[in-house]
Image: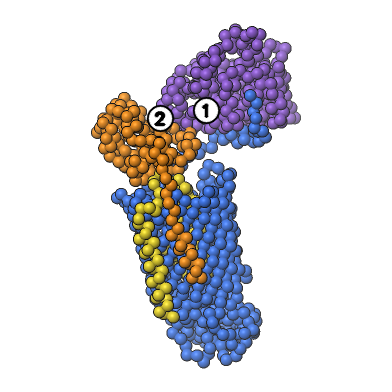
Amino acid sequence: MQLKAKKTNLKAMLTTASCALLGSTANVSAQETWQFDTAIMHYAEVDRVSATEAIIAGTKKFNNDEVLSLKLTIDALTGASPNGATAQPTPQTFTRPSGNGQYNVKAGDTPLDDTFHDTRVQLTGQWTQPLLKDYTVSVGGNFSKEYDYMSASLNGNVARDFNKKNTTLSAGMAYAYDVIEPEGGIPKPLSEMVVGDSNDPNFNDDFNKTRIASDESKSTIDLLFGVTQVINRQMIVQLNYSYSTVSGYMTDPFKIISSVNKNGESQAYLYENRPDERTKHAFFGQTKYHFDSGILDASYRYMTDDWQIDSHTFDFRYLIPFTNGHFIEPHFRLYTQSAAEFYQPFIAQDEAKPNFVSADYRIGELDTYTVGLKYGMPLGDGNNLSFRLEYYHQTPKDNGTQAIGVLKEVELYEQVDAIIAQVTYSF
Amino acid sequence: MKTIAIVMTALILFITHAQAKDSTSLQYKDVIKQYKGDVIYLDFWASWCTPCRKSFPWMNKIQQKYADKNFKVISVNLDAEPNLAKQFLASTPANFTILYDPDGSLAEELQLKGMPSSFIINAEGKIVSAHVGFTDKKKVKYEQEIEQLL
Amino acid sequence: MLIINRYKVLVVLSLVCSVVGMSGCSSLGVEPWERDLLAKKEMALTSAPIDASLDDHIYFSKEATSGGRSFGGGGCGCN
Amino acid sequence: MSNMVKGDRVVKCLARKGGFTLSFFSMASLCEVLIDTDNEALATELGLIAANEAWRIEDKYSRYDSKSLCSEINSKAGQVVEIDEETFNLFEFASQCYEMSEGTFDITSGILRKVWHFDGSDNVPSEKSVEAALQLVGWDKVSYSANSFLMKKGMEIDFGGLGKEYAVDRAVLLISQRSNAPFLVNYGGDLAVHGTRINDEPWQVGIEHPSFDASQSTLVTLRTGAVATSGDANRFLLKDNHRYSHILDVVTGWPVKNPPNSITVAAPQCIQAGFLATLALIQGADAENFLKEQNILHWSIR
């Protein structure tokens, strides 16, 4: 009886087989051990901010189906982000948030503040366990600290299974407390940024007049109600309603708004001011459909809040597995939001100062899309490695505001391009 | 934008009908007839169900422990394709009877509530108790119930 | 502007309730032993939690909306 | 010349040009460890390491020793047996060999010895008895995990095809960890070398396989890696002048058609060489082409 199949890589297979035997590395059986996921992600915008984020997350399943998961996140941020002022046909000078030193912006450029370099450490823990017959409860906490910001939150969730686990209703609540202690202190809302020679004797007094506190805080209460329903053998659907109310300091201490004259020329820069209450409603629907081999993950989120921001988010992923355990997963995300009621790219000097105003494009009218691809491969013995590369594009819109005077010649709504690159290794 | 939202919600509400089941396969009375007079631990498992794998070493143990007290562990595999079960069994030894119920007719007859499901059946063939899931706490309870019947 | 928003919320809310109500009936769903595809880890609703938490952090600091899939995220100065 | 005694197991130490030769008996073969060193104490210590490991493996995996783990597994066939990590790794290796050989290299095929006795006579077993024996053969009927093993009642496993070569590789591993003196380990024709000798001289070894008469021994020169020999010329059956070789095709249960008398194969490790030699024999007439196709260095005696 001859060995029919052409065994070309016999020697290679034999080498791995015998080295497993004689190298005899112990492979601990997987029941009670920790499952780890580690990832490094680099987010980089063109000429703007870039951040590197590393995560190590461990999950341990206990023998009565309890699950403990711990996660450590460290991220470092560098680069420049827009300070809110408009571009001008002439060069501009701004004072650094700390109050000592200035930075200059060339004519025609969107003003960017490059004082941002920050490192953040975040610890997250979650304990989940079954309760009585059909209930699962989960409690968790989160603590995050960076140079000028601290955040702590607790969350709790209970879920109940119905009709042979085909339907699951869940309800959860989370409370978060954040404290911001910006370098240079909390600016006085709508006060004018002091721009001038910082070693001029009364510069400091003028600067301190624009400060009202050294730190501010806000607290957030989130409620989340969800229903997960198995439709059939290939399809599962989840529908969530989440209610979130935030009270406290939500202004961005580093953001300003240009006050321009009739000809659009900046006369002053005012520190922005946002309301100290915000209530958000979000409706989220997700479905996963298992085709013959591929898996579609499609979700839609509608958010509306009392800052008059409405947003729609569409997210589609399609996992294509290969026979050797590798897979690729194309990803497409579409996002659009309307502007906050108090968003304005600039304010006219002679106009009455509004109560709340912000020129932060991130709460203006905005469309974004993300296109990406993830490639994964198993490395044997339960370990796998995956790479993800995504392109993220932001298109700020004018929300109906007419550019005036010289502002017509400059780019008020600069588009942003960013790359997300991530490597994940789980073992 | 509004139309896409409506289409999306319609997609989510898309409902398909369950396939029809033929009834030529496993029935409870046939299974019980073969093991008349034995106390039975009837277990339902499938290759894709991770808690099921944890129950096998325990089922091996009680099958050996009470073998002489006419006690039988019968496990019913519910995989649609039998070779998935074979792969599972190649790396999870089982020294008890394995029956195959690919179209789930016995599972349906006993109205399984979850996976793994198990039934403790007394010597007369009557189901004494039904359980879902397998954890350390539950396996102690199952063994106590079995000992009471032996 | 205010009235239209109120109306939009009601429409969507009623949509959610109808789905929840309907999904209660038992024709939806599978038998416990028919969950082979659903049991796959790739079929979990959040099958890549690490990617999801990294994305939440990016979009929280670059857009005005967060959460929905799970709690609102945030916890950073993110400017 | 000195002996180290461990019960009835003796390790002899003989001086030779450029070093020492340690010899002992294990797994029914003469085992030798040639070490290039002028330090006799080191040589004896390394020899003892190899001998103790060989005896440990023999006590654990020999089918003939009733107290061995192998015998325990065979006697408890039909029940789940506890196994340790080393045994699990051996089963993993055997399982890969089973797949690579498409079922023809199978450590559960020892049962066929119950029906086939290659004593040169003509008692070829009946079709029925071979068929009955085959019911108890088949690695696919076995199931094992990291700490437990189960096979059908009546089945038997036999580490014969792997045990000696595994002992050679283990000896090389343990000795090389302890010293970097160049050495050669030769357990009854299965041998492996380690380290580079002075001015990179190769080892010259004549392989006297038990079945050979003196004239037919193979002379092997080896600088690195391992060599294993499979085949036994004087075990066969002769009936109506048809010669039945002792190499059995595990799938049909009948002898393979005219395989070479013996094949010696070279490979990086002895356990690989052993598997390839046995696998080549199973290809019968096509043995040599099979090895050529896989470009594996081999010597064949027909």
User: Which residue position holds label 1?
Assistant: D139
Q: Nearer the viewer, residue A51 or A264?
A: A264
Task: Reply above or below: A105 against A228.
Answer: below
Chain B colour as displayed: orange
Chain A colour as displayed: blue
Q: Position of residue A214 (x, y in %)?
A: 44, 76
Quarter of the image where the N terminus of chain D is located: top right
Q: Which mark is residue B95?
A: 2
Q: Residue at x 57, y 91 (%)?
A: A262
Q: Nearer the viewer, residue D86 or A108?
A: A108
Q: Residue at x 40, y 75 (%)?
A: C7
Chain hosting mark 2: B
Q: Residue at x 61, y 11 (%)?
A: D237
Q: Is residue A400 left or right of A31 when viewed as pictured?
A: right
Count of numbered labels shown in the rendering: 2
Q: Position of residue A225 (x, y in %)?
A: 37, 62
Q: Is residue C72 left or right of A110 when viewed as pictured?
A: left
Q: Label 1: few (<14), some or many (≥20) within 10 Å?
A: many
